[in-house]
Image (cartoon, grey):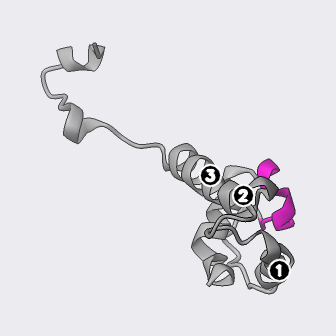
């Protein structure tokens, strides 16, 4: 049961906000990087484990906007990424995965 339901103008479907920093970037994006780069998945068809050095070089060469709060570290350190690094990878570094 949700206590918010007792509020007169609260609608669960329309009034709930999603925390994109933690749900999308630290949740979904981190999970994708884990599946793509984790050694135990290297033989699966979605794995890009063997291309990690190339992708890291491509990301390093991407010009990030001055508004980017944190430039991503080496992609091999993805497990330690902060949400802002994951956000930068998703928004600006996606071309390295193409």
Q: Which residue is mark 1?
A: 60
* Disc 3: which residue: 31
Q: Which residue is mark 2?
A: 41
3 vs 1, front mark: 3
Disc 2 element: helix
- Tell me how far mark 3 sits from mark 1, CA to CA: 21 Å
Q: Are marks 2 and 3 in contact (CB under 8 Å)?
A: no
Query: In x, y percent, where is residue 98?
Result: 61, 84
Q: Is residue 73 left or right of residue 68?
A: right
Q: CA distance from mark 1 to mark 2?
A: 24 Å
Question: In the rendered structure, does residue 78 fall within the stretch colored magenta?
Answer: yes
Position of residue 83 measured from the top left corner of the image (x, y, whole percent): 67, 51
Between circles 1 and 2, the one closer to the viewer is 2
Q: Are marks 3 and 1 in contact (CB under 8 Å)?
A: no
| Observer able to see residue 73 | no
* First to last magenta residue range: 71-80
Q: Position of residue 8 (x, y in %)?
A: 13, 21
Q: Earlier in the sequence, mark 2 or mark 3?
A: 3
Q: Residues within 10 Å of mark 1 (few under 14, many from 20)?
A: some
């Amino acid at each position: 049961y949700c206590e918010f339901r007792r509020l007169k103008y609260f609608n669960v479907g329309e009034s709930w906000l999603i925390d994109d920093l933690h749900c999308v970037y630290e949740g979904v994006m981190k999970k994708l990087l884990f599946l793509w780069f984790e050694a135990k998945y290297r033989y699966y068809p979605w794995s890009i484990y063997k291309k990690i050095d190339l992708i890291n070089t491509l990301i390093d060469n991407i010009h990030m906007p001055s508004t980017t709060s944190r430039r991503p570290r080496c992609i091999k350190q993805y497990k330690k990424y902060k949400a802002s690094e994951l956000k930068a990878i998703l928004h600006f570094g996606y071309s390295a995965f193409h």
